[in-house]
Image: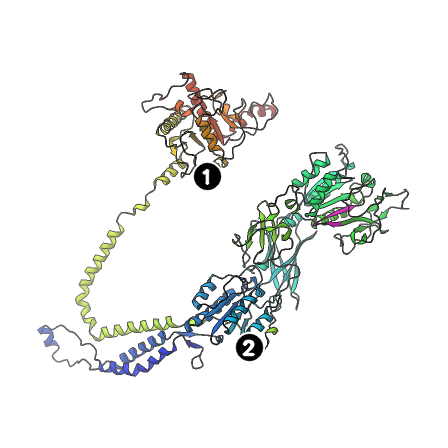
Amino acid sequence: MFAGLPLTFTAPWILAALALLPVIWWLLRLTPPRPREITFPPTRLLLDIDQHEETPQRSPWWLTLLRLLLAALLIIALAGPIWRASEPVETGEGVLWLLVDNGWTSTKGWETQVRTAEQLLTTAEQSGRPVLFAATAEGPAQSLTPEAAATALEKLRALEPRPYPPQRNELSLGLRKAAQENQPGAVVWLSDNIYTEGAFLTDLSSILGDIPVTVLSGLDTPMGLKDLANDTDALSLTVVRHPAQQLSTATVQALDLKGLLLGEVQATFNAGNTETSARFELPSELRNDIARVEIAGEAAAGAVQLVDDSWRRRTVGLISGQSGDLDQPLLSPVYYLERALAPFSDIRRPRDSDIDAAVPSLIDQGISVLVLADVGRLPDSTSETLREWIENGGTLVRFAGPRTAGGSDELIPVRLRAGDRSLGGSLSWKQPQHLADFPEDSPFAGLKVPKEVMVTRQVLAEPTSDLPDRTWAMLEDGTPLVTAAPIGAGSVVLFHVTADSSWSNLPLSGVFLNMLRRILSVSNVAAATETTAESTQAQSVLPPLRLLDGYGRFGPPPVEVTPVSATEFRDASASRRTPPGLYGNEDGFRALNLMQKDDELLPLDLSALGDNVSVAAYPATDPFDLRSVFFTLAFLLLLVDAIAVFLLAGGLSRLGMRGRTASIATALVLAGGLLVATGPGPAGAQSTSPDLQALESALETRLAYVITGNPEIDDASAAGLAGLTRFLAERTALEPGPPIAVDITRDELAFYSLLYWPIDPAADKPSDQTMARIDTFMRNGGTILFDTRDHINASANSFASTPATLKLREILEDLDVPPLEPVPPDHVLTKAFYLLDSFPGRYATSPLWVESLEEIAARGDRPVRAGDGVSPILITGNDFAAAWAISSSGEFMYPTVPNNPVQRDYAFRSGVNIVMYSLTGNYKADQVHIPALLERLGQ
């Protein structure tokens, strides 16, 4: 500080130059001002003969004072004045250790931490002190050796808060080694005031000994979210705050995958509490769309909870041991199960009635819950498949019935007695039994038991020591109604009654629906993605998809984050190796959230550091560099001095003489500016050739052909498409523009619906990048007509091994080509404009191959197939371009084989149908139904 003021200097020794101000004053007094200049004509001399003005011998006192003030301002500015509103942090001498917490809890005060660190490093750089810079969330891989302060500043500017807590314990070994090599002079810790588990403070105390430690604290800590639960009625979370946090409310928002707001609730903290609950009481359909829950205004990874598929609708497979009766659905247990599960799950039914094939089929469809209604003994192979699926997270729900009473397999939670217990039987009740209240540790806990639910028949469990622990629901007499047991990562649940109303009226009650919903809520939705019998190593690994940064924003995964096995993912926590975010792929992903159920935001306890620690608050405001202010004032005084000298030297009297010269100069400058403004524009404004081609192709429909590099083939293609364009303009309403040659390696293909590609056997195979562009063109609705032009040389086999055919196969091997077939008689191509039964070109022996359509039963009243889309690929060997080619004189360039005018006319008609087909798709297929539709409508 300077004279009790919050003012410091980066180079205070320069202030010694202020002692030279008396010398500067003495010099200025001795130096007279510049003599005044006046014109000297005789008349002017006569007019001034009586005047007695004299030039002063010394500078005026006010001018001298002005110049002294100017010199003083320059000296102070060079000394580097800095205004500090708070006391600077004492850093001692020697090596400075600067520790910075950069976990997610630093996000709210990160700018303050960076600003403070910059001050310390700048001071160290000016004094030439080495610095050991360590960020507590960066791990032991960072350099923990003293380095120049400028290098530490570069690291600081590249540092960001990480989406996980600080890993302070990982630094202990590196700091101990650094202290052994070079003891620090002082340690400054820019903390986030959050406690983390481990012995870091104890280790730091033993490493430093008596070396002073300054801990800066007092930053605002962001609130966090944890303990996400999707209950029957609401999606609930716990909001956590730091004990020093003053805010008593938090706004919690639920967003969907597109970031749209689905719900917003206010969470209020009671006085002295650090946790409160937030509940989104939304319909299940809306809750299934929630993808992210966050605290509004808290830009931190811990203030975000991601919702993955495990919180959404389950996929449930249903298998019944009874044959379904379509005429009497109320007798089928599947009827009750479908209606109970449909509101909150997606149901899958097997197509195969064989259970040995039905179970693997449903597992392959990605089910998370499998319901078996009165299925007795499972085949051994099916039982093994199911056990493996359950061990990897699947949930098997079984309902009893006559088959189960006769004996079951090992996939049940408890051992069963043979036979069943019924009203009036050997193990009978005197009256039907009601449900007892659900146990507190049961997933059904809290559900209201309706009085009207009665059970008349059940299968009994053998009494064992673990039977109470496996009972989720029981009757009033204490016998189990629902039992469950874990198997691996999954579970098996057994209802000791049927799923229909034959043994009880439970399926007719509302509690039955809620019980099934609770079972689904505790099931693992991702089981199917991890556990098919044929699952590979790649399928059991979850690669990082989109991860959160420290501020809770999604971003691409860093290169150092590796995939996580599905088994390890269940127990994973947010760390440097597994940051919070989404893992998997777009078709199915899992969410890893930062805060877990037992996490808390506890204050930092520094008692382990003993008496060597001093706690200070972060600077409230930034230090202000006053150099720019002093330099600006000095410059303004310099301008005032220049004006004063100008006036004292008689500058005003010379302005009249120079006015004309200034006017001429101004006129010349304005003229030059006009010439520049009216000059020609830059040549870069002109359109380039590709831009012009794209513009022309976008403004009018044009036929396009692929450049092969063979002049003969390319000339024939250009002439052929020109002839077809002319024929289209004469015979149809379409008036295409001139055909265009396309370089498939660089030209944009999206402007064209049809691309004619003549095959040159001598051409090189296109590159992978080019084939990717072709594949994209075909996937986006474009059609390519491949023409091998060699059918005169081919055998009767439509795909003989000619050089052009082999080249075509080489080209197509990297494309996603659909199954092909010759154009069938009822295809849209046969009726797109002309009615055709063949598609000749220069040759007439090759069929035209198109995408194969799904076979359907032929009907006499439907002249074309429904659903004809545009085939992305057409293949012929008839050399269409040669048949269409017309010279500039209007003559045909190539004869047809055989030379038949009718064949050439049909070749043009084939071209018209192909163009219309590529432009309109199945339009003609729809139009031909109009007469039949009008007739049926009575019009």
Q: Nearer the viewer, mark 1 or mark 2?
A: 2
| Residue 768: mark | 1
Sequence-wise first label, 1 or 2: 2
Q: Badge 2, how many Cα within 10 Å: few under 14, some, many 20+?
A: some
Task: Work out whether residue 565 can be spotted.
Answer: yes
Bounds of the magenta span? 485-495
Per the image, the residue denoted by label 2 is: 210
Q: Count how many numbered circles sit on residues in the image.
A: 2
Q: Is residue 846 left or right of residue 422?
A: left
- Tell me the kind of residue under disc 1: Asp
Callout 1: SS? helix
Quarter of the picture holding the C terminus: top right
Cβ atoms at labels 1 and 2 below 8 Å apart: no
Most common secondary structure along the magenta stretch: strand
Above or below 373: residue 568 = below
Pick the front one: 179 or 912:
179
Q: CA distance from mark 1 to mark 2?
A: 67 Å
Q: Is residue 785 visible?
A: no
The answer to which image quadrant residue 320 occupies is top right
Q: Secondary structure at mark 2?
A: loop
Q: Amino acid at mark 2?
A: Asp
Q: Position of residue 651 (x, y in %)?
A: 20, 71
Residue in view at x 17 percent, y 81 percent: 54
Kindly identify which numbered label has been placed on residue 336. none
In this view of the protein, which residue sits in the foreground, 243 or 649? Answer: 243
